[in-house]
Image (cartoon, rainbow, N blue to C red):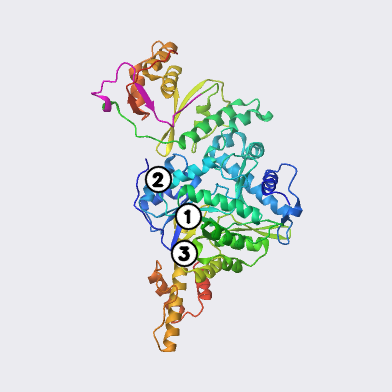
Amino acid sequence: MLPLEHLQTTMARSVLAIEPMVSAKMLTAGKADPLARLRIYQNNTRSSLTAVLMAVFPVTVRLVDERFFRYVASEFIRRHPPVESRLARYGAGFPRFLKTIDTLSDMPIIAETARLEWAIAEALDTASLPPRTLADYDKVDLGPSPDILLQPSLRLIVSHWSILSVWTAHQQGTVVDQHCTWTRRPERVAVWRAENSVRLVLLDRADFAFRHSLKHGFGLEHAASRANALEPNFDLVSALVRLFADGLVTNVRITVHSLSN
Amino acid sequence: MSRMFQPLAIPASAGIGLRSPHIGEMLTRRPSAGWLEVHAENYMGDGAGVEALEKLREIYPLSVHGVGLSLGSARGLDRDHLERLRRVCERFQPDLVSEHLAWSVADGAYLNDLLPLRYDEEALAIVARNVETVQGTLKRQVLIENLSAYVAFADSSVSEAEFLAELVARTGCGLLLDVNNVHVSAHNLQYDAKAFIDALPAGAIGEIHLAGHATNQVGADTVLIDDHGSRVPPVVWTLYQHAITRLGPRPTLIEWDTDVPVLDVLLGEAMWADMLTASIMFSRKQAARQAAATKSRPGSPTPFENVRTSMPVLAAFAAAKAGPVLSNALTPMEGRYDVAA
């Protein structure tokens, strides 16, 4: 008789359809064939995890066709099953996995769009803190370079492809032109949670660098200099107003920075 | 720091499993639902659902039901996941916490399904140790749910019911009796569903689950699939009736996870569970009174005499429809359900 741990390892591999399968002698199922019953577990695991991936990557499903998505998902599940039961975390590696699929090699925009969808899923599972307004700091001396803390759900994505355009075109109610070809055009996208939904905004490279620096805690002075280096006419006041108007600022702190980069 | 909620005890009546399509309606309409149960794993992040549940927790008693702890894993518990469960309990302060007699993690993979154990001494020692770890971490008793199964292990030395009874004795845990699971497993593995319920320690059963299942025909094999995707079928209501007759009223949950219908369907199923329980309790009282009158002396109360069911008016209504005395509660209740369904 196998030790329980060995038995469970064998069963787990059988459920994921990895050879060698568990021996029929180990199982009973009334009058039924135990190995046929084992397929119920295989199907449960594959179909439930495929449903998880389809919920996270709905635009990718539409881009590649549902049957193909299901095939790719089942391969992903077999090779990369979840490592924990928090399924909100399952799918992080799926966009990268899509890049390894030969059939999709000449359509990199699909994996890139999946990357955007994963960022949306992450944002939706992250806290939305009460936003601060500019008026909150009317009579506060913030020093020369305050830290501006942004919503923790903010995700910043840069792609060589027009991922936001693709994503927007595939939202409910939008008529998709099946004959259009998606262009290779860099897009920088900000994604964050706003109550029950997400907001997605296209950024220019200076604003992207500005928000990226703030998100990583480099402070206002560093963020402004990064943006200015990319765009000499960068308008800091407008960028700050947009940041507050978007509800992205959760706190402003006076901090002494010793960053050299 | 977690906010403090007013303690809300889960009543011995029916509640519903909270599912995401219903959250908005629950918040705006605030329907009469005895209590709510949520899957712990859906509230381990910081999404909008978490904020909504905090609002609902102010109104409804709450049960937290884990599906991913893998209490039967021979390699032991995932301590990070247990810590996340502890934080969920700290955050929402539920009145009940439950998990499954199953395993779902092995070889570094989470299978997103509940697999059966080989019921023997080795497994009992492992599950008992894991349950004690959970109860010690959460500083509370947890309820352990019986499983729906499609296979069993040939080398099991005891039944699942005997295993659960011994687990209760060793750890002091409670039990969550899933009546649909009993029916599904009893059919699939060919044992007596009522005998399974009767073999469990009645005093340990702190909650009951009800759900629907699917029937699949694979060649000559008719297999029941525990999909939680339909109304509670009459055969499960009958088994529930058997359980309540033996146990008395218990917190009873309507579970629905696939093809989730409108909220009112779940609330309607919960109402049926309440009516059935009330009817059983009412007929027991009637029978006790009649027996006392026959003996021409004051009757001693039945074990359930002092139990307050949640819907006495409905019980009286049921009794009026069924006639002056309900000598057997099973038949009339099954008939009423069929008519309404």
Q: Nearer the viewer, mark 3 or mark 2?
A: 3
Give how far apart the Cα atoms at labels 2 and 1 are. Answer: 26 Å
In the rendered structure, which segment of residues is drawn in magenta?
A: A136-157
Mark found first going from the N terminus, 3 or 2: 2
Q: Is residue A176 above or below residue B307?
A: above
Residue B305 rendering spot, x and y as whole percentages:
41, 74
Do the residues at pointers 2 and 1 share their chain? yes
Residue B156: image quadrant is bottom right
Mark found first going from the N terminus, 1 or 3: 1
SS class, disc 1: loop
Q: Is residue B113 above or below residue A198?
A: below
Which residue position is annotated with label 2?
Answer: B52
Q: Is residue A170 visible?
A: yes
SS class, disc 3: loop
Mark 2 and 1 residues: CB-CB less than 8 Å, in contact? no
Which residue position is annotated with label 3?
Answer: B250
Magenta-colored stretch includes residue B338 = no
Mark found first going from the N terminus, 2 or 1: 2
Q: Chain of mark 3?
A: B
- Left or right relative to B240: residue A233: left
